[in-house]
């Protein structure tokens, strides 16, 4: 079983910054991918950023403002969010793709609320 614990959400004014963290624990042979998705009210869940090996991908809406990074030793992924806009308001979910018992699985965090408002 794999658990993901997220932290770092909250309320911030437009133009501000937040840093999200997601720590994975449990029995994993390897982690293939770590990333962040978000879901705003009335909208579908969408990819924000993901990291797989040396590659990173970002949604066009966050390029140049958000940075994803990983600490593989700590099995932790971070999302540094700068120049936040009201449209970034959403619940942010951590996602991990890992091999457990020889089988590849996807795991989701519980979500953390990010609200950008003055």
Image (spheres, rainbow, N blue to C red):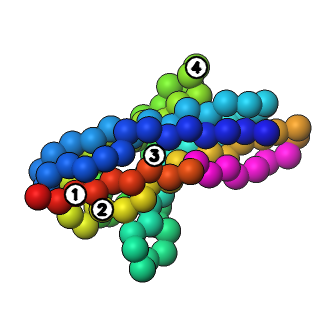
Which residue was labeled with disc 2? 89
Label 2: how many residues lie within 10 Å, few (<14), some (14-19) or many (20+)? many
Q: Is residue 83 visible?
A: no
Residue appearing at x 20%, y 64% in the figure: 86
Which residue was labeled with disc 4? 73
Asked whether the residues under the numbered discs 2 and 4 touch, taking CB atoms below 8 Å apart as contact, a structural biologist would say no
Residue 108 in the figure: left or right of residue 67: right
Q: CA distance from mark 3 to mark 1?
A: 25 Å
- Would you place residue 65 above or below residue 74 in this image? below
Q: Which dot marks residue 60? A: none
Asked whether the residues under the numbered discs 4 and 3 touch, taking CB atoms below 8 Å apart as contact, a structural biologist would say no
Pointer 2 or 4: first along the chain: 4
Residue 41, horizontal then vertical, whole percent:
40, 74
Residue appearing at x 11%, y 58% in the figure: 118
Q: CA distance from mark 1 to mark 2?
A: 5 Å
Pointer 3 or 1: first along the chain: 3
Q: CA distance from mark 2 to mark 4?
A: 30 Å
Q: Secondary structure at mark 1?
A: strand
Pointer 1 or 4: first along the chain: 4
Q: Which dot marks residue 116? A: 1
Choose mark 4 or mark 3, whichever is in front: 4
Pointer 3 or 2: first along the chain: 3
């Amino acid at each position: 079983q794999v658990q993901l614990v997220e932290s770092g959400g909250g309320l911030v004014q437009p133009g501000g910054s937040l840093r999200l963290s997601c720590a994975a624990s449990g029995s994993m042979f390897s982690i293939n991918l770590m990333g962040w998705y978000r879901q705003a009210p009335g909208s579908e869940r969408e990819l924000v950023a993901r990291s797989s090996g040396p590659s990173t991908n970002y949604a066009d809406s966050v390029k140049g403002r958000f940075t994803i990074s990983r600490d593989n030793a700590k099995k932790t992924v971070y999302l540094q969010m700068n120049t936040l806009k009201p449209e970034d308001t959403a619940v942010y979910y951590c996602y991990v793709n890992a091999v457990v018992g020889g089988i590849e699985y996807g795991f989701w965090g519980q979500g953390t609320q990010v609200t950008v408002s003055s």
